[in-house]
């Protein structure tokens, strides 16, 4: 054989070239260019999918997208220089010469365009799209990513990674959610790049010309979403990738975790201490030491001789148990999971057909291939035993995949439902598919009960199966604030249910830091304290009496807010709008909210503004956006937009309530299993107009999916001096037979008239009682101003209730 000498052909950029042919399809348009192929598909009038490939076929398998194109009206027209695909709200213009894609709204305003001269770029197996940076453009979202709320000037990589003790700049972390929202000129759009290969996003990092995204394999496959607001775009994105189901009510409570509680009497001890100290909590979490030699689906019989009994005893005290689920299956003869996995061929393999072995807690392990249907079913059925033992909560860890050495070989084979793929395609989706298997298996075996499921690694769509926590954070103020941003960014990216390790996983928090962290954590969708093995005790009572009081106050407040919070979760379930809402959702074009001093602020549900502040600050600056805001602790009214200084001692986290809104609350309970007093505390804040969808159901089963729920609108209209609770929809009865209304900020109320559903006057001149605000976290002198608010108690009825004052 003769080897010819020639110069090596190095990889360089190649664009799409010119349009050669195109065709209108059932849902859009497809075409061929000199260098590739494309297809544009209308999913809804607001969503157009673009696929670009170098081949005349496209990757269609997606574990993220749950919907198919809806029949929508669209038109395809040909102009001199371009093809135009138009729906009633979106236009896609495809330039014929050096093919570029531009998206405009129906007024012809440019939303997003491929950058002339760069556009689509093929470089070997990697493919990229370069988009012109618009004037004043900002970028938000991309899931669990460090950095600023506005991602402009930053670049990111998606490659799910076990990031022990990550820093505030580390990238990548554990999750891949390739969805972001662009904002400019009062316009908003979203881009979801559905490709599980390693991807890179550049939002004007090291350049002033473009934003871009690159994939290391597979097709360019992105969904362009246009909506009138950020909220609408999130709702469209979650239309594509799915929404969370209602969590079990206990999932809203406080969970106590550590690495690890054992043996059983230590677990009992922790649970009993919560009850003794009257600090509400709903779950104890068992980390890896509950297992026999870290073998999943087993219990260490010395430490936990009778798990079933322990779980039942805890349940009787109002605690659920959450167990660690690691994917690595120990290679050990006679270990059932190993034997079954080999027999049924369920593990990841090398290309030569041998099983891949990697080292993790149990020693050498094989790893279930969750992209294989048989493996998913097998894993799901393994949940039967846990379910039988009474376990209701599942914690999916190490699913990046994490192994000692952290280098899963690139050539490992994944099944991909028969399609096949290597680590390059499989890694970022492993966590998602593990969560799917755990969740669906637990659900199947739990007998109409909602499992609680938690994960560290994720891909888009994970919200359908699990809550996400932000992994191994560190005990510093910087991390506390970073955690808030990560959770808010996850919320912008479809994951409404997320949280962080309170107190920090790695390191030890100061007394002040723990106190601050737990008060902020009370306003996190997922609320859990956790800490590393061999670190100091970190339960709410471990930092002295003052911190114990602060912890109790804020956990109490969390439990009092459950009627509000559960309704907010229902909104996440129906519309995808997160529980923890970056101010970029409601105040997208207000420059101040992106200011580094204010970017951590967020709305907890629609009505409570939380201003997280470092533990060492006694006073802090807060930005209140447009609208009026009540200081939650003092009732002082502020007129936004404004920057104010607020006292922020450890006892008083700065919290503000939106004027005009309502906060439904309940009495303190020690766990969600305990019934609150049958009195709903409805706090109404003066001014403006608001609507709040109030929601209840049994908190535990799936009956809500067939109408067994309690839904009513609470409409507060200050101008007309009315408060209306609309007629109840659904067949579930409320827990509350009476409603106590608190009028905050109303100058003077002489009398109140109560009307029934037929608008007949039922009662007049009801008596007001002055009340001391019962939710004011106690403890500090300067703010110990007792608040007097007029109250009124009425009977709850399923019919419309109208109050005129
Ligand atoms: O190699 O299960 O992020 O929360 O406590 C560490 C032990 C494995 C990592 C998780 C952490 C958990 C720990 N796990």
Image (cartoon, rainbow, N blue to C red):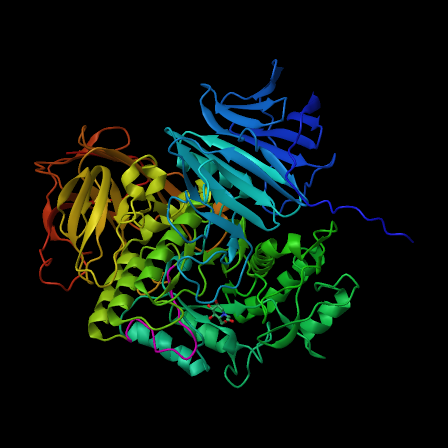
Residue in front for this viewpoint, 550 or 666: 550
Of the 4 image quadrants, the one containing the C terminus is top left
- Answer above or below: position of 784 versus 586: below
Q: Is residue 612 magenta?
A: no
Q: Residue at x 73, y 44 (%)?
A: 9
Looking at the rendering, which quadrant does residue 316 occupy?
A: bottom left
- Residue 284 vertical position relative to residue 132 in the rendered view, above or below: below
Please, what is the dominant secondary structure of the magenta stretch? loop
Vertical order, 112 against 468 (above or below): above
x and y, in percent, of residue 367 in the image: 66, 66
81 relative to 261 in the view: left or right: right
711 and 759: which one is in front? 711
Left/right of residue 616 with respect to residue 92 in the rendered view: left
Does 168 sit above or below residue 660? below
Side of 65 where 144 appears, left or right:
left
Is residue 732 in view?
no
Closer to the camera in the image, 509 or 159: 159
Question: In the displayed image of the protein, which residue is found farthest to the top?
Answer: 80
Q: Is residue 531 magenta?
A: yes
What residue is drawn where x is 60% and y is 33%? 50
- Residue 80: image location, x then y, percent: 61, 13
Point 39% across, 59% down: residue: 168
Q: Quadrant of the N terminus?
A: bottom right
Pinpoint residue 134: horizontal percent, then vertical percent.
43, 31
Name the outermost residue toward the bottom.
302
Magenta region: which residues?
A: 527-542
């Amino acid at each position: 054989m003769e080897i010819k000498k020639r110069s090596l052909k190095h990889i360089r950029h190649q664009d799409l070239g010119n349009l050669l042919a195109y065709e209108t399809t059932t849902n859009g348009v497809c075409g061929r260019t000199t260098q590739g192929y494309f297809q544009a598909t209308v999913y809804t009038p607001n969503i157009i999918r673009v696929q670009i490939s170098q081949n005349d076929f496209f990757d269609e398998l997606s574990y993220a997208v749950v919907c198919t194109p809806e029949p929508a009206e669209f038109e395809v027209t040909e102009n001199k220089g371009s093809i135009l695909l138009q729906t009633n709200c979106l236009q896609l213009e495809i330039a014929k010469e050096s093919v570029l894609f531009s998206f405009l709204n129906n007024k012809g305003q440019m939303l997003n365009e491929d950058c002339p001269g760069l556009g689509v770029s093929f470089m070997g197996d990697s493919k990229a799209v370069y988009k012109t940076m618009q004037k004043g453009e900002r970028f938000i979202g991309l899931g669990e990513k460090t950095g600023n709320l506005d991602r402009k000037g930053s670049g990111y990589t998606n490659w799910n990674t076990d990031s022990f003790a990550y820093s505030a700049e580390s990238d990548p972390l554990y999750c891949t959610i390739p969805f972001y929202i662009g904002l400019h000129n009062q316009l908003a759009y979203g881009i979801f790049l559905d490709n599980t290969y390693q991807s890179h996003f550049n939002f004007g990092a090291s350049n002033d010309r473009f934003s871009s995204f690159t994939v290391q394999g597979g097709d360019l496959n992105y969904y362009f979403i246009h909506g009138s607001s950020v909220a609408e775009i999130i709702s469209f994105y979650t239309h594509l990738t799915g929404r969370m189901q209602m969590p079990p009510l206990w999932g809203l409570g406080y969970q106590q975790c550590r690495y690890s509680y054992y043996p059983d009497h230590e677990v009992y001890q922790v649970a009993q201490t919560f009850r003794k100290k009257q600090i509400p909590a709903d779950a104890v979490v068992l980390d890896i030491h509950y297992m026999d030699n870290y073998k999943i689906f087993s219990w260490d019989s010395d430490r936990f001789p009778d798990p079933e009994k322990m779980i039942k005893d805890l349940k009787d005290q109002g605690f659920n148990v959450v167990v660690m689920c690691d994917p690595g299956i120990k290679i050990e003869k006679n270990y059932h999971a190993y034997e079954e996995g080999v027999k049924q061929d369920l593990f990841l393999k090398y290309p030569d057909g041998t099983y891949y072995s990697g080292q993790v807690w149990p020693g050498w392990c094989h790893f279930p291939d969750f992209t294989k249907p048989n493996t998913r079913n097998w894993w799901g059925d393994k949940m039967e035993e846990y379910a039988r033992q009474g376990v209701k909560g599942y914690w999916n860890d190490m699913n990046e995949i994490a192994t000692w050495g952290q280098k899963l070989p690139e050539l490992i084979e994944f099944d991909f439902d028969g399609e096949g793929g290597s680590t390059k395609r499989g890694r970022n989706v492993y966590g998602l598919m593990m969560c799917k298997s755990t969740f669906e298996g637990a659900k199947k075996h739990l007998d109409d009960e909602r499992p609680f499921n938690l994960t560290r690694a994720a891909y888009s769509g994970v919200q359908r199966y699990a809550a996400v926590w932000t992994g191994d954070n560190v005990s510093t103020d910087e991390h506390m604030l970073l955690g808030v941003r990560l959770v808010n960014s996850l919320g912008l990216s479809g994951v409404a249910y997320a949280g962080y390790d309170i107190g920090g996983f790695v390191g030890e928090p100061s007394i002040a830091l723990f106190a601050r962290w737990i008060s902020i954590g009370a306003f996190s969708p997922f609320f859990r304290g956790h800490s590393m093995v061999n670190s100091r005790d970190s339960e709410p009572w471990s930092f002295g009496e003052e911190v114990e009081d602060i912890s109790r106050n804020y956990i109490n407040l969390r439990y009092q807010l459950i009627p509000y919070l559960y309704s907010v979760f229902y909104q996440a379930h129906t519309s995808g709008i997160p529980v923890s809402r970056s101010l970029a959702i409601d105040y997208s074009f207000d420059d101040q909210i992106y200011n580094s001093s204010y970017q951590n602020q967020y709305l907890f549900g629609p009505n409570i503004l939380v201003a997280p502040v470092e533990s060492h600050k006694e006073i802090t600056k807060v930005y209140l956006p447009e609208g009026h805001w009540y200081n939650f602790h003092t009732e002082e009214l502020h007129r936004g937009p404004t920057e104010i200084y607020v006292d922020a001692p450890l006892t008083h986290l700065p919290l503000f309530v939106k004027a005009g809104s309502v906060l439904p609350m309940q009495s303190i309970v020690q766990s969600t299993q305990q019934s609150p007093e049958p009195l709903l505390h409805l706090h109404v804040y003066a001014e403006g107009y608001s609507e709040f969808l109030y929601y209840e159901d049994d908190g535990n089963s799936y009956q809500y999916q067939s109408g067994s729920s309690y839904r009513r609108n609470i409409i507060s209209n200050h101008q007309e001096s009315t408060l209306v609770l609309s007629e109840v929809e659904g067949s579930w009865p409320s827990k509350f037979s009476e409603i106590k209304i608190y009028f905050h900020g109303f100058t003077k109320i002489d009398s109140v008239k109560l009307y029934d559903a037929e608008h007949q006057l039922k009662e007049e001149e009801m008596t007001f009682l002055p009340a001391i605000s019962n939710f004011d976290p106690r403890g500090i002198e300067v703010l110990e101003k007792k608040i007097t608010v007029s109250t009124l108690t009425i009977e709850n009825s399923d019919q419309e209730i109208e109050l005129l004052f």
